[in-house]
Amino acid sequence: MALWAMSLAWMGAHAAERQVDMQAFAPEQGLNSLAANVLLRDRQGVLWVGTDSGLFRFDGERFVAVSTGNDGLQLHVNDLYQAASGQLWIGAARHLYLWQHERLRRVADVPVDDLRRIAGDGGQGVYVRHEHRLLHVTADGRVTKVAWPQALSTGALTDGPLLWHDGHLWTSCGPSLCMRDAGATAVWGTDRGVPVDQWISMRADARGGLWVGGNHHLVHLKAGAKRFEAVASANPLDALAVDGQGRVLAASAGHVSRWDGARWMDFGDSGNLQSAHLRDLCFDRSGAVWLASAGRGVFRWRGYGRFRNWGVAQGLDSVPTWAIARDGDGRLWLGNQRHGNLLEPGARRLSPWPAAMRRPGWTDAVAVLPHGRSVWVIYNRGTVVRYNLDSQRAEQVAQNLGWVKFGLLDGTGRIWFGTHGGLWRIDRPDAPQPQVRRMGTGLPDNTNYLSATRDASGRIWLATSHGLLRFAQQRFTRMRLPGAPAPGGYSGVAATTDGRLWVAPVAGGLRWTRPQPGNALSMHAIEDPLLERTALYSLEADHAGRLWATSDAGVDVLDHGHWQRLDRDDGLAWNDVAPGAFLEDADGSVWLGTSGGVSHVLHPQRLLSPQVAAPVILEADYGGKRLSAGPAQRLDWNGRALTVQLASTGVVHPATRHIEYRLDDGTDDAGWETTTSNLLRYAALSPGHYRFLARVNAPALRARSQSTTFDLVVVPPWWRSPWAFAGYALLTLLALLALWRLRSTQLLRRQAVLEHLVDVRTRELEADKRALEATRRALEYEATHDALTGLLARGAAVKLLGAALREATTRLRPMVVALIDLDHFKQVNDNYGHLTGDAVLVQCAQRLRRMTPESAVLGRFGGEELLAIWPGLSRADDVEGRFASLVEAEYVDGANRLRVSCSVGVTWIRPGDDVESVLRRADAALYQAKALGRARVERSE
């Protein structure tokens, strides 16, 4: 009779199935075995998965195989248990292991053939159930069989779960439950509220209660209670988990359900759950639910308890959803791509719009505006419809008004909507025949009216393609904004409760201002890397002061100065959020329309501003040697790499999050590096003291975590120790000294050789110099002297004449310049030959040199003419007598004796003379002597 009553209670309290968003993890995400048996979230928040082919951990993005030293195929993991001390017990098909200090250690040859077969003992050991036996195993490997009633007696062990709870060991025993306390066993049966069943799962909650699931029942023992409370279940409860609100989530083959204390709620997805044998489930730090399946891998239920999504499975007729509103009867209206849906109060499934609203052409509803007992629907192509909730009749008020972008119901009951090219208003929505009129805004006719909002003062603000427009006191004002106009204008506008007005430029980014009297506004840009790169669709504000900015990347929410992005990783139905599809419900929850369905944000205040957990070091390895937590470890240098495997726990957005890390070695140049990988690697480290630091940067949450650190001392080998380097320095010094001695000897020898070579070369150079000087003098003599007579050449003689002129003029000394010409010299050459003529010239020059002082300048002026510059002779001197030996002379050339006379023309230096004037007078005197008969000396007057 009791079971029949419970069954009726279950039938009346069972709700329709809800659709959930499951993310699947398979080999592509690192989970190399699809046979997942057990889940465990350890003290650090890391998720472990035991499979038929090894052990895996989740690093925040993908699963990473745990390096156990065992062949994965030999490690068939069926159960996981972590003691309060942090020791992790691993129950495999053949052995029982302990995971300590990042190493797997086999403790005992005790097989564990199913999950929930390991339980604590309140100390360092565990209890293990195997083949109707209960064993106690200590960390050092001692195995003791626990005495228990035998088969066919009350309280005999049967196959079932095991749990250490509140200082007692609980397990199943036949159709009942047994509690062991201080060596005594107590059987809890129907007299203690436990119905007859096969009990298969156990879970303790945060309030000290105990939950036990069977094939047909769920029982609960509250903390301190003496009796279980039972409720019937239509499905076996293979795995249990208790959420933060005390609700029990249960999983079995192809089924997930939740007991909230009054009724069961069933959950399903697009098909993964229905075909999966669910073995275990647990919650992570973010509140997401993880499910292990035998053959389908692992699933992550995104947004559990935070989002509720409505899609095609719940009756949504199409996507996207463009408009959301709640009418006066509490119905939720959804305007979709096709027609729309209604959600009746308390309903678990969407229903179609009323038949009167499902007309051809009435599709793509952009705005749904409840007003009194009517619901106004404005369609994308400019059709305006009014639906009466009482008569359930719909009437078309206007059509073909243009492409509609928004609809707004202001505080006075007027309806506004904007189109491409116009702004429209309905002043009396309740009138029998309401009129739609086009508003004159003063903006160009091609203006697109994209969004509107009403602030606390009742002013209407409009975002348009030609800037920002304000409607107040029955007039429109185009606002003057600083800087150049925003390209394309503004796509969104919203007013928050703190008095700020927000606008979203079409080109991207976000700005805000505080409206002041007048038409000028000062704008402040939001400096946010994500928003600066995002073209926002629309802006919405709720009554809690939050700002919601939608885009194709999700929705960015500003809550008390902190930004956070919500997307599919958080549980949003789809990242592409439709502009204007926003509703803040009476309970503070928020509805959002997307291209993948409708998302209901159940508790925005719980969802926003989560903390970013510091990364967890899954494994650190230096040259094949694993590092463990604790004080700085000293490891011998081996020249190999340092690798660190990290995991991100809690709320993390893998698409945008990255790891920032550094390795400090005591210098100041160790900066932060950035990577999207959780596996970090440093090439061969030099000996020294290092500190590794890593933190998570989550741009979607606009937050960084605290740093995770560990210290490492790389000890140098003996040949790199300080004593070795001191020895190297000493040997180097001795070697340098020996080299210096050897080099000095070589240099001295080389110096002697070089000095000898320099001495020889110096003598050679001096000889060369003397030879060159002689050659130079010879060349100079040849250049300035006549080769035949040895007298100065004409050029040299004339040059010296110029110098003599300057000296004579300066000193006022007399000086004679004479030109001497051998008479009839041509006849000598013709009669005696040129050689005799040359001999006559040479002898004449010799006589001239003998008769003149050393200060005289003698030269061959040309042919048979000679030049004499004779200083010191005045007009009073006997010049004719001085030249007498030349005027008539005898010359001898071999057998030839010749008498050859000379004609001489002389002149004296005068003031103002130059070389040319002097030579002209001398030449004139010479020709005078020739004219008077030759063989004479003539003076120039």
Image (tube, rainbow, N blue to C red):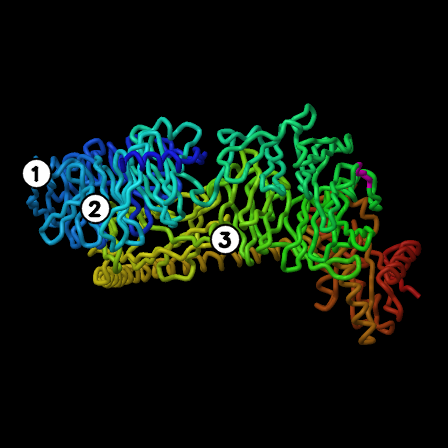
Residue type at tag 3: Gln
Helix, strand or loop at disc 2? helix
Foreground: 671 or 213? 213
896 on left or right of 305: right
Residue extending farthest bottom: 811
Q: Position of residue 786 (x, y in %)?
A: 71, 53
Q: Position of residue 459 (x, y in %)?
A: 74, 54
Q: CA–CA distance between discs 2 and 1?
A: 19 Å
Helix, strand or loop at disc 1? loop
Which label belongs to residue 192?
2
Q: Which residues are magenta?
A: 433-438
Residue under pointer 1: 153
Residue under pointer 3: 605
180 on left or right of 682: left
Which is nearer the N-term, disc 3 or disc 2? 2
Q: Position of residue 635 (x, y in %)?
A: 23, 54
> Could you classify mark 2 by the number of other residues whose Cα lies within 10 Å: few (under 14), some (14-19), or many (20 or more)?
some
- Placement of 372 over or under 906, stated as above or below: above
